[in-house]
Amino acid sequence: MECEIPVINIKNDEYKEIFENTTTIAIPGLSPNEEKDSHRVAKYLQAQGYKIIPIYPKGDTILGEKVYRSIEEIPCKIDMIDMFRKPEFADTLVDAIAGRDDIKVLWLQKGIVNNAAAKRALDLGVKVVQDRCTMIEHRRIYAK
């Protein structure tokens, strides 16, 4: 997939609503390495009171939370998916979203765009954010 410019994204005034209506965030690509962006962002979100659910191919826990291998394995309600994977993986996530009715937001982190997957998610009634960082947007809204 070549580099894309996001043509599907929420409006700036919708970020606060997303954060206020989110309690549980599944994070595909959450690395156990403390120096990785995914780890720093997840740790920040956790410190803000969000329940994080790591999705990673190995390990048992990250940031004190049980690690799952896929969305399909997660038994509890998920409000948001915050993806730290290559853009083409968003297609797999949308397939998983289609099998659940609890996921309301698909968030593709900074530098990640997949307009085709975003369109499919929108068609399922899921809000889509592309090429934005959850930590940066949260800080922008709630900075004291």
Image (cartoon, grey):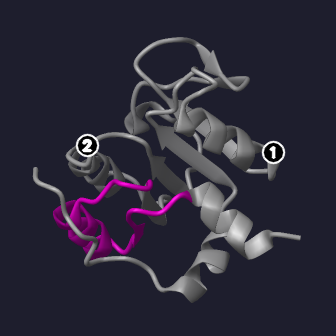
Q: Is residue 17 positioned above or below 102 on the image?
A: below
Q: Position of residue 126 (x, y in %)?
A: 40, 70
Q: Pointer 1: residues within 10 angstroms few (<14), some, or many (20+)?
A: few
Q: In this orientation, which residue lies closer to the viewer: 114 or 102?
A: 114
For the view shown, which residue lies furthest in the top direction? 59
Marks 2/1 in contact by CB < 8 Å: the verdict is: no
Q: Residue at x 63, y 18 (%)?
A: 61
Q: Which mark is residue 47?
A: 1
Rendered location of residue 28, percent (x, y): 44, 38
Q: Residues within 10 Å of mark 2 (few under 14, many from 20)?
A: some
Position in image of residue 35 (x %, y %): 60, 27
Q: Is 29 part of what is drawn in magenta?
A: no
In the rendered structure, the answer to whether residue 53 lies left or right of residue 89 reads right
- The residue singled out by tag 2 in the image is 89
The CA span between labels 2 and 1 is 27 Å
| Position of 116 relative to 34 (above/below) | below
Would residue 39 be found to the left or right of residue 71 on screen? right
Disc 1 residue type?
Ala
Q: What residue sits 28% from the left and 71% below the top?
A: 6
Query: Circle 2 — which element?
Result: helix
Q: Amino acid at mark 2?
A: Phe
Q: Which residues are magenta?
A: 109-133
Where residue 139 sits, quadrant-wise, is bottom right
